[in-house]
Every structure is written in C-alpha cells, then in structure tokens.
Amino acid sequence: MTNLLIENHGPVRIISINRPERRNAVDRETGDALYNAFQDFDRDDTASVAILTGVNGAFCAGFDLRSLAEGGTIGRVDDAGEDGCFDGSLGPMGPTRMVLSKPVIAAIEGHAVAGGMELALWCDLRVMAQDAVFGIYCRRFGVPLVDGGTFRLARLIGQSRAMDLVLTGRPVDADEAEKLGLANRIVPKGDALDASITLAQEISKFPQICMRNDRLSMLQQWGMDHNDALANEVRLGMETMNSGETLDGASRFSDGEGRHGSFSNE
C-alpha cells in the first residue's frame, strides 16, 4: 500500500496521506514522499492548485512516534542546504520548509494535530469539517515544533493566542478555529474535500501569473521593511503586467465581462 494517493481533477491535484492504521501520521518515508509530491506539483504546468488531505476521515496525527519507538528515525531536523539556509530543505513532516509558487489548500477532517497541524499551517488555506480538531498534542510528549509551527501560528493568529495553544497543547474545535483565523471555511462533516475541490477550481480559473505573483509578494513581505515590501510588490506587479495578462483582462472587462462585481464569464 502506498503512503500517498495522488489524483487530478483538471488543474487541481489532490495529495492524500494514506496511512489509516496510524491516523495518517507521517513517518520518514511518508515525509519524503510528501516532499517529492509537492515538488512535482510545483514543477507541473498542468497543475494550478493542490489539496492536501488524509484518508478515512483523518487529516494527520503528526509525526509517527510509534515508528520511532520501533526503531525508525525522524532525520533531517537540522539539515540546512549548502548555504546554511533551511528554505526548500526537507523537513521531518516533508514539505513544510518549501515555498511553492502555487497555492495549497488543506482539506481537514478529523484530527490535524502536532505535526499534522504544522502541515495545515503550511498550506495557504484551510477548509475544516465541523467536527475536526486542531491541537499541539505533541506538547504532552516533549516533541518540539520543528516544521514551522511556532512562527506560522503566531503570524496567522497573533502571538498571544498562539502562545496559548503552544503552551497548553489544548484541542481547538472548528468554531474556535474559525474565530481565531486558523480555518478559512467550515463545512459539514465529510464535506471538506469536496468543498476544497470547489474552492481550488475557482482559484485555478483566475489569471495565474497575477494570482501567483500577488501571493508571492504577500509571502515575501514578512522578511522586509515597508519600503522593500512596496518595491517587491511593484516589481512583481510589473512582471504581471509585462506578461500580457493585465492587458488581456482589461480587454475582457471592456467587452463586458465581470461587470457589477460578477465572477461569472457569462
């Protein structure tokens, strides 16, 4: 049985963790597979949006601690690149140190806890089933957050709220997750994947150069001061305009598309 299931719905790629016997916990082999799968997605011109999910009503229970007890290894915790930079390197949970050029949506059913929560935080958007749960459950076992959880959580919801979750490890249900800004959409149990596919298909219909450059500008601004962030936004914006997408969009608007805020092409 393969640890990952990969399927395509047009420009939408679905990557599912397939370890139901371990509630989709990630061992070293699965982390490697996830890294390679998202690397392939980012390089594939036919794929515009990816969805990360898990099989059998569970997102991911974190790193597979049982595999460690059975003699497995985490590996790659402090493996930086040749230049000493961690960006793009392989993390214990797989892709969490990568900065992709295209968006990823987490379709969350059941538990997204410990490293599984870090995987969800790595994604651009999170679609969460009503009965799903977030939580830094690894707090109980002395397992640190080394897949971006500390800084991504604080950046998403603010340090005070993030500190509460990091220090206590307590569960966070869907209603609280939406209030905190952790969840972007709440859907009925069992509907997270279908809702994510619909959302991904909507995103894939937009002019992709513009969408990706605006996304990249938002990601890159964290390490910049005000002026550098503005300059980077302008640089990426000019790249979009020079691509021809903006002129094409202006022509379509002039022909009547998108009037009165409509997102329909009709």
Image (spheres, rainbow, N blue to C red):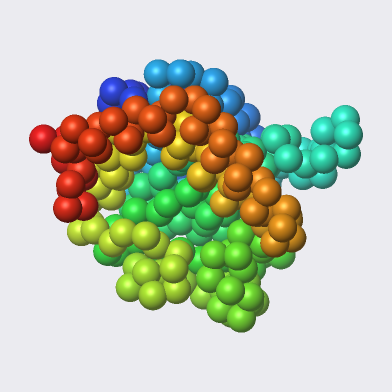
Occupied quadrant, residue 180? bottom left
> In the figure, 119 relative to 81: above or below?
below
| Viewer-side residue, 173 vs 249 | 249
| Viewer-side residue, 229 vs 179 | 229
| Viewer-side residue, 141 vs 17 | 17
Give percent across and percent down for residue 39.
Answer: 58, 26
Q: Left of 59 or right of it: where is 192? A: left
Residue 220 appears in view: yes
Residue 143 appears in view: no
Task: Kindly identify the residue that appears in the image at 40 percent across and 54 percent down.
Answer: 126
Task: Kindly identify the residue that appears in the image at 46 percent across and 56 percent down.
Answer: 112
Quarter placement of the C terminus: top left
Give percent across and percent down for residue 111.
Answer: 42, 57
Give percent across and percent down for residue 242.
Answer: 52, 27
Task: Kindly identify the residue that appears in the image at 18 percent across and 47 percent down.
Answer: 259
Q: Left of 87 or right of it: where is 112? A: left
Occupied quadrant, residue 33? top right
Task: Kindly identify the residue that appears in the image at 49 percent across and 33 percent down.
Answer: 241
| Viewer-side residue, 200 vs 169 | 200
